[in-house]
Every structure is written in structure tokens, then in C-alpha cells.
Amino acid sequence: MTTMKKFSAVTVIGTIIALLIPIFIISAYVWAAIVISDIPRSHIEGNVPDEAEFQGFLTRDLEAYFSEQLKKPVSVQQEMLHKGTYQAGVGDPKYYAWVRVADRDTGKQIKEGVAYVAAKERTHFFIIEFIQKENLSSDLNSLKQNFPSTVAEGIERKLKE
């Protein structure tokens, strides 16, 4: 003879709830991950200038930054050290560029190094940091400790030129 256990309605409901709670928690995490993963993309789209304007805006803003720092008009040549943007959370999209700064009147080079910049409102960049060539290590492992790998490799290449 088999014995059947009788379960009360409270026990059955409690068991169902206990089984559903992890499903709801996992669903919430998945939903949050989907929503959060769209934030950086929308933040990039909302801050990075169109491709046709990108280089012009960056050169303009680098020239304004260095002209103010050096108290004289300068011209800037810049080259991106990686493709794409570096985006962390909802911060502004960031870029690394190799920059050569020259006196606009004489053409004499004044500075050379890495500029770390952020795109803002699709209209401009602001310079977060500039590191002069003389202050950069030529050791790739050391560079990789301070910069993303592709940027470190770009810096190493520029230091060898």
C-alpha cells in the first residue's frame, strides 16, 4: 500500500513561490543587463560627432587647448591611436590621439605626445590629459599597464618613428 502525503494549500503555494523567486531574480538581472548594455551605445551616439566632422572638431579643440596652454597660436597634427571609442558606463566616450603641436607662425614643433580626450554633445572634445613623448616609457609592458593594449601598441609604434 502506498502512502500519499497530503499537502496543505499553504505548503503548495509556499513551494511555488520558493521556485518562482529565483526565476524573477534572474529575469530582473537579464532585463537590467539588456537595458544597461544599451546605455553606452546611446551615450556614444549622443556625444560623438558625425564621422565627417570628427577630425575637424578634434583638431579645432586640440588647437584651442594648446593655444591657451602655451599662450600663442599653434597648429596641431593628430592621429588616432586606436579605432573606435573607449566607453565605461555612462561616461563620455573617450579617445587617444598622438598629437604634434607646432608654433603656427614658425612651424617649429613645440610638443608631441598622447592626448586623452572625450567627445561631448556631438559638437566638441575636451582634453582630459596630455602626456609628452619624453614622459612615456618605450617598454610595451609598461605602456600596457597604463593604457589599453591597442593604444599601448600605437604609442610604441610612434615612439619608434
Image (cartoon, rainbow, N blue to C red):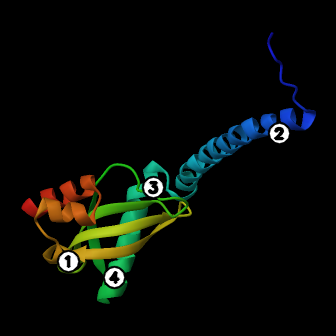
Picture disc at residue 53? 3
Picture disc at residue 67? 4
Which amino acid is tagged 3?
Glu
Which amino acid is tagged 1?
Lys
Distance in Å between CA atoms under marks 4 and 2: 70 Å
**Location of mark 2 (residue):** 14
Which amino acid is tagged 2?
Gly
Front: mark 4 or 2? 2
161 with respect to 85 (left or right) = left
**Location of mark 1 (residue):** 111
For the residues bearing labels 3 and 4, Cβ distance under 8 angstroms? no
Q: Residues within 10 Å of mark 3 (few under 14, many from 20)?
A: few
Which amino acid is tagged 4?
Ser
Q: Earlier in the sequence, mark 2 or mark 3?
A: 2
Distance in Å between CA atoms under marks 1 and 3: 25 Å
Q: Residue at 29% across / 87% down in the picture?
A: 70
